[in-house]
Image (cartoon, rainbow, N blue to C red):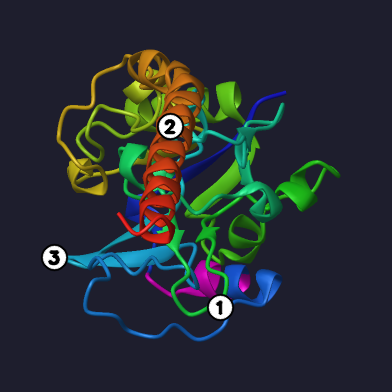
Amino acid sequence: MSVAILTDITKCIGCLECVAACKATYGLKTDVPRNWHKDDGLSARNWTSIIEKPDRHYVRKQCRHCLQPACASVCPVGALHQTEEGAVVYESDKCLGCRYCMMACPYGIPRYDWDEPVPYIRKCILCYDKIKNGRQPACTEACPKEATIFGDRDKLIAEAHQRIQDNPGKYIDRVWGEHEVGGTSVLYLSDINLDFLAYQSNLGTTPLPTTTELAMGSVPFTFVGMGGVMLGLNWIIRRRTELAQVEVENGE
């Protein structure tokens, strides 16, 4: 079963209970402000955030858990991968620190942990340890207004469209995440445009991995090719050094 989160912006009161629950669950430390941090509240120590917009609109931002994740498709070592439930999880012991995932994500989610001696990528993992045991994520469990709820993806999409139909004029007639980049497991209902959550306003419906497969397929050959080049250069330099040393010894 593919699970998902549905966040209804019209219900959110900006209480930050979801943020606190996430930090408590994963023991995330207090964030250290950085000049290069994006103005969205996310960092290696904040995996979900609340963005305040005019007229008391509070928009929760977190990993969208794409059905065909670009971050996983560009990872050369499989440190990011999608589970059967739909969560896109991260394994730090495999990570090279290349940060390809940060460049590939259309929502700008993965963040680099600059405060650790050995830095890694950090992001929401949809509380995978909980959902694989039949529980719900900490953030949805903590929400006092059920502004963000958890369940079967198909049922949540149906619920979202039903709310739109039952409340004419209340919502924009769109379920964010239903189709964008092939669909996501974090969905939104809203009465304001949420395109600011992505790098561009029109992401389209084509899954991004279809555009990265060719490039990533060439990575192993590139590594091998560069290795050959470096070995060749090393041999040439070493050979020249040896010849120069022979000339010095012969007094030439």
Checking the image for residue 205, the label placed there is none
Which amino acid does the dot numbered 2 rest on?
Gly
Residue at (62, 66) in percent of width and height? 142
Residue at (72, 26) in percent of width and height? 84
In magenta segment, residue 15: yes
> Which contiguous range is marked in magenta?
14-21
Q: Secondary structure at mark 2?
A: helix
The quarter in which the C terminus is drawn is bottom left
| Earlier-in-chain disc, 3 versus 2 | 3
Is residue 201 or residue 44 the one in the foreground?
44
Checking the image for residue 54, the label placed there is 3
Q: Secondary structure at mark 3?
A: loop
Which amino acid does the dot numbered 1 rest on?
Pro
Q: Where in the figure is residue 67, as x and y percent of width and height?
A: 51, 25
Residue holding disc 2: 232
Q: Is residue 69 visible?
A: no
Up/down of 58 relative to 92, above or below: below
Up/down of 91 relative to 14, above or below: above
Residue holding disc 1: 117
Is residue 203 or residue 152 the one in the foreground?
203
